[in-house]
Amino acid sequence: MSQPCIFERHVQADPALVERLRRIPVANISDMMMRLTAGGPRLRPMHDGSPMAGTALTVKTRPGDNLFVHKALDLAKPGDIVVVDAGGDLTNAIIGELMTSYAASRGIAGLVINGSVRDADFLRKASLPVFAAGVSHRGPYKDGPGQINVAVSLDGMVVNPGDIMLGDGDGVLCIPLEQAAAICAAAEEKHSQEEQTLKAIAAGTLDTSWIDAMLRQKGYLAP
């Protein structure tokens, strides 16, 4: 890590766009990103399952240390998602009940921790979205170093300050801010198509002829 530094974030996602994305399943949005975005599988919901959507405020910290996370909670604006790259190490928890309660009191919209959390019983009942890679009862250090509002990587998923962060039961997804409007429009169309498919399933009218057509095209069925 280079010299510790705290930067200002100069971009903010449009709240109306964030709200549109909140209403779409993460899986549908992921499909519109060519299924190339990593970072979701290890980061699991630790809360009551409420969906997460907001603007990323990023933190890069030494594994097991939360000094810069405390500072980020003070810097975050209502609607922000504090995204912490703690190296994926699970030895020491980065946040727990106290920090989560403080985040909720400030209107923060979610916490994403590439590392451990603790006070899991409390988090599981809370509505503030918390996604993490694991749980550990061992507390954090408060020594630094760290960086705030720099690009971070969560198991290959790059998150820049100001990007839109989403999360539901399928995991966490980052949408680059400059692509968010186009991805949202495509994902809304995808979601609408799936709703029509569900109606066809319920009505018993689903057309599955495409399956045999695809098998023939690939040579798995005789013409």
Image (cartoon, rainbow, N blue to C red):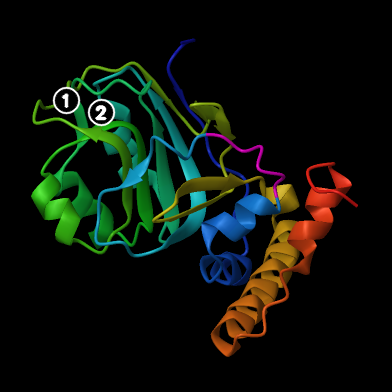
Q: Where residue 146 appears, x then y in whole percent?
A: 38, 21
**Front position in the image: 13 or 22:** 22
Highlighted magenta segment, given as a residue range: 33-38
Residue ID for mark 1: 140
Amino acid under disc 2: Asn
Q: Along the horizontal axis of the image, is 215 left or right of 124?
A: right
Residue 96, quarter of the rendered image: top left
Q: Where residue 22 appears, x then y in whole percent?
A: 52, 66
Residue at 78 percent across and 50 percent down: it is: 215
Secondary structure category for the residue under label 2 = loop
Residue 19 in the image: above or below residue 98: below
Whether residue 221 is in magenta: the answer is: no
Q: What is the residue that sits farthest to the front in this orientation?
A: 222
Residue at 67 percent across and 85 percent down: it is: 205
Residue at 14 percent across and 45 percent down: it is: 120
Q: Which mark is residue 66?
A: 2
Q: What is the residue that sits farthest to the bottom in this orientation?
A: 203
Amino acid under disc 1: Pro
Secondary structure category for the residue under label 1 = loop
- CA neighbours of label 2 inside 10 A, class few (<14), some (14 to 19), many (20+): many
